[in-house]
Image (tube, helix red, strand yellow):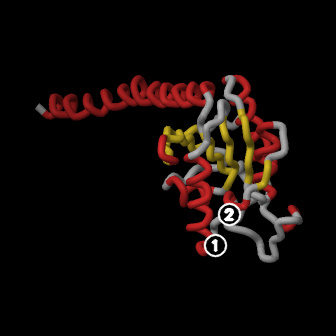
Amino acid sequence: MSMRTEGTSYRPAMLAGLLFALVLVPFRAIASDALWEKLKAGGQVVLMRHAITTPGVGDPPGMRLDECATQRNLTDEGRRHARRTGEAFRSRGATVERLLSSPWCRCLETARLAFGIEAQKLDALSNLFGRPENRARQVDELDALIGKWQGKGNLVLVSHGSTIAALTGVSPEPAEMVIATPRSGGKFAIAGRLLVEAR
């Protein structure tokens, strides 16, 4: 009797494990492929968080935007991850029509390493961490920018986790991308999230 009970109690756990392996993982791959297809077709807006930086939260005391040495910057791992992300765009045929970045050095370097060009600085993409007084202004400006995007290619915005979260409600990992699809009436919808594997 006890053996039969053990057998029936273990079977659901085993089935759950199989379902995870056979269903959930492929679903994630399918979702990722669908987002890459959207990017290949163009007309999307990519909100990308800068890649991995030296440890810390916010900015060091005395940080200056015109002096990268005073900021938290990318690590070698972060630089590799940025390059890998750009390689994924090229291999998938996803074109970048316009590239904008926060004026912080870690964002500018992420953009340059990923896409091979210098990004145009945009103050609305600046770090909101510790700067709540700027939130409404920056979110309104970015909301309008994304909602009216009508390019044939994609608009890529490289920013900070705090800024992307304030705009979308999504808190991305380093180098993760939140894909936004412009809608009529100047609105946009979140299509999903993409994170290229760092190797």
Using the rendered view, name the quadrant where residue 81 is placed. Answer: top right
Q: Residue at x 60, y 66 (%)?
A: 137
The C terminus lies in quadrant: top right
Numbered badge on residue 192: none
Could you say where residue 125 lies in the image, as x and y percent from the top left? Answer: 68, 57
Give the secondary structure at mark 1: loop
Could you say where residue 183 lies in the image, as x and y percent from the top left? Answer: 49, 41
Q: Residue at x 59, y 47 (%)?
A: 146
State left or right for residue 13 relative to residue 30.
left
Q: Residue at x 61, y 30 (%)?
A: 39
Residue under circle 1?
130
Q: Nearer the viewer, residue 116 or 42?
A: 42
- Visible residue check, residue 15: yes
Q: Nearer the viewer, residue 16 or 153?
A: 153
Could you say where residue 71 lies in the image, as x and y percent from the top left? Answer: 81, 65
The three-letter amino acid code for the residue at tag 1 is Gly
- What is the crowding at mark 1: few (fewer than 14 residues within 10 Å), some, or many (at least 20)? few
State left or right for residue 167 relative to residue 67.
left
The three-letter amino acid code for the residue at tag 2 is Asn
- Visible residue check, residue 75: no
Numbered badge on residue 127: 2
Residue 189 versus residue 12 in the image, above or below: below
Q: Residue furthest left?
A: 1
Task: Find out whether the residues at labels 2 and 1 contact each other: C-beta distance under 8 Å.
Answer: yes
